[in-house]
Image (tube, grey):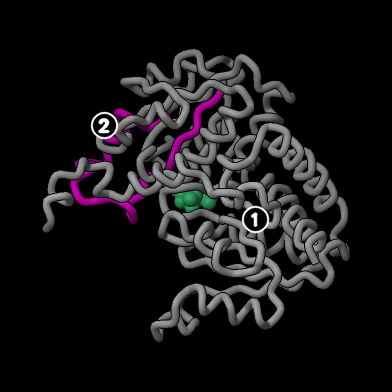
């Protein structure tokens, strides 16, 4: 092991440094190219609000009309999910089909990637075969940005490592705008749990900051990145402190697949210290809501009666997912057409 490795702080060794570096650097110019959606970090307030308006419109339309529209007729979308997903992939697939696009789906298993072909070379095959837009999920932070630089197709980030998950961030903002009746001012949200490995938290914090919502984070010390305040939040020492007087809480899934061993000694201890149960819900404002991006580990991040309880908006978040993905696909497709 090299000197730099052994002396690197824990958050650098676990790859979180890489994600932070990406956030701070920003993609030169790429963030302004509307063919892509790489992160909420790169959108301004007006663009976010416009996407939320479009998502509301699309959701209402999708719920009303079961027949696909022709808005994206002639557009080919590739869903390239190199990590598991239920909600995000299904919402993109259904939204794309309902807008009249051709939607094809691949995972890493069935591709020549397993024969050693690079990701860029693989995606160039799809580009040559007429694909316009790639929705990509990948375990490595920065893959969508890298692809946006090296292929000619539009790139939508469906979650990259510990970096960003912009469409989930938009889902969270859309849900909060509904429950807060359009007003983000003077609101505060607590985000509790595995902040270190959470692309959901990074996108949410970026978006919430732009809309003027205060963010307090809390979680086990081993799952809070060093210097987390730089993301635009304050740090609370306990879950109770974070939730006291909050307007919403977002619990995050424990990202076991991204964790080094030993970051979390005991799940029952976690549930006791950081799990959101009825007592903790009662510490928030009377009309405060409980969010979770899913998938939920019931009894761990959220108590079972809280997941299914009256303050939970977990299923509302799922429902909003299709509206957001529809609006995002249309935004990219429009920019691609404008260029052509
Ligand atoms: C999230 C993800 O994959 O980043 N899930 C999702 O998109 N609904 C959150 C998670 O996996 O914990």
Percent coordinates x, y for residue 246 in the rendering: 51, 18
Residue appearing at x 46%, y 55% in the figure:
142
Quadrant of the drawing holding the N terminus: bottom left
For mark 1, what is the residue? 36
Percent coordinates x, y for residue 42 in the rendering: 59, 42
For mark 2, what is the residue? 221
Looking at the rendering, the stretch of residues picked out in magenta corresponds to 248-276
Give the number of the mark in front: 2 or 1.
Answer: 1
Residue appearing at x 44%, y 40% in the figure:
252
Q: Can residue 257 be seen in this view?
A: yes
Percent coordinates x, y for residue 228 in the rendering: 37, 31
Task: Find out whether residue 252 is within the magenta segment.
Answer: yes
Residue 93 relative to residue 334: left or right: left
* Spatial separation of the CA atoms under disc 2 and disc 1: 35 Å
Residue appearing at x 40%, y 86% in the figure:
115
Residue 336 relative to residue 261: left or right: right
Task: Find out whether residue 215 is within the magenta segment.
Answer: no
Tell me which corner region of the image, top left, top right, bottom left or bottom right, holds residue 16: top left
Residue appearing at x 43%, y 54% in the figure:
141
Q: From this view, report whether residue 324 is shown above or below residue 127.
A: above
SS assignment at label 2: helix
Residue count near mark 1 (Cα–Cα under 10 Å), binned few <14, some 14–19, many ≥20: many
Residues under numbered marks 2 and 1 in contact, where contact means CB atoms less than 8 Å apart = no
Q: Is residue 296 visible?
A: no
Tell me which corner region of the image, top left, top right, bottom left or bottom right, holds residue 55: top right
Q: Which of marks 2 and 1 is nearer the N terminus?
A: 1
């Amino acid at each position: 092991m090299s000197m730099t490795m052994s002396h690197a702080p824990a958050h650098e060794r676990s790859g979180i440094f890489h994600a932070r570096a990406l956030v701070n650097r920003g993609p030169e110019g790429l963030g302004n190219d509307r063919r892509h959606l790489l992160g909420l970090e790169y959108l301004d307030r007006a663009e976010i609000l416009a996407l939320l308006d479009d998502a509301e419109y699309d959701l209402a339309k999708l719920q009303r009309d079961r027949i696909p529209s022709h808005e994206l007729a002639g557009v080919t979308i590739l869903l390239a999910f190199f990590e598991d997903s239920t909600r995000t992939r299904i919402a993109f697939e259904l939204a794309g089909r309902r807008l009249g696009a051709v939607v094809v789906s691949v995972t890493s298993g069935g591709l020549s990637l397993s024969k050693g072909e690079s990701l860029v070379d693989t995606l160039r095959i799809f580009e040559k075969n007429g694909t316009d837009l790639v929705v990509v999920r990948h375990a490595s932070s920065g893959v969508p940005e890298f692809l946006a630089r090296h292929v000619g197709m539009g790139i939508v980030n469906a979650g990259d490592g510990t970096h960003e998950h912009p469409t989930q961030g938009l889902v969270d903002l859309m849900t909060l705008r509904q429950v807060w009746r359009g007003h983000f001012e003077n609101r505060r949200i607590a985000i509790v749990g595995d902040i270190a490995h959470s692309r959901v938290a990074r996108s949410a914090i970026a978006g919430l900051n732009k809309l003027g919502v205060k963010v307090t984070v809390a979680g086990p010390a081993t799952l809070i990145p060093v210097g987390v305040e730089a993301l635009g939040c304050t740090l609370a020492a306990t879950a109770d402190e974070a939730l006291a007087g909050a307007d919403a809480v977002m619990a995050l899934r424990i990202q076991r697949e991204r964790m080094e061993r030993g970051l979390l000694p005991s799940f029952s201890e976690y549930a006791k210290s950081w799990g959101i149960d009825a007592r903790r819900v009662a510490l928030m404002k009377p009309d405060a809501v409980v969010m979770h991006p899913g998938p939920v580990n019931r009894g761990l991040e959220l108590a079972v009666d809280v997941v299914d309880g009256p303050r939970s908006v977990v299923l509302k978040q799922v429902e909003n997912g299709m509206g957001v993905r529809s609006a995002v696909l249309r935004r990219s497709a429009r920019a691609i057409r404008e260029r052509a």
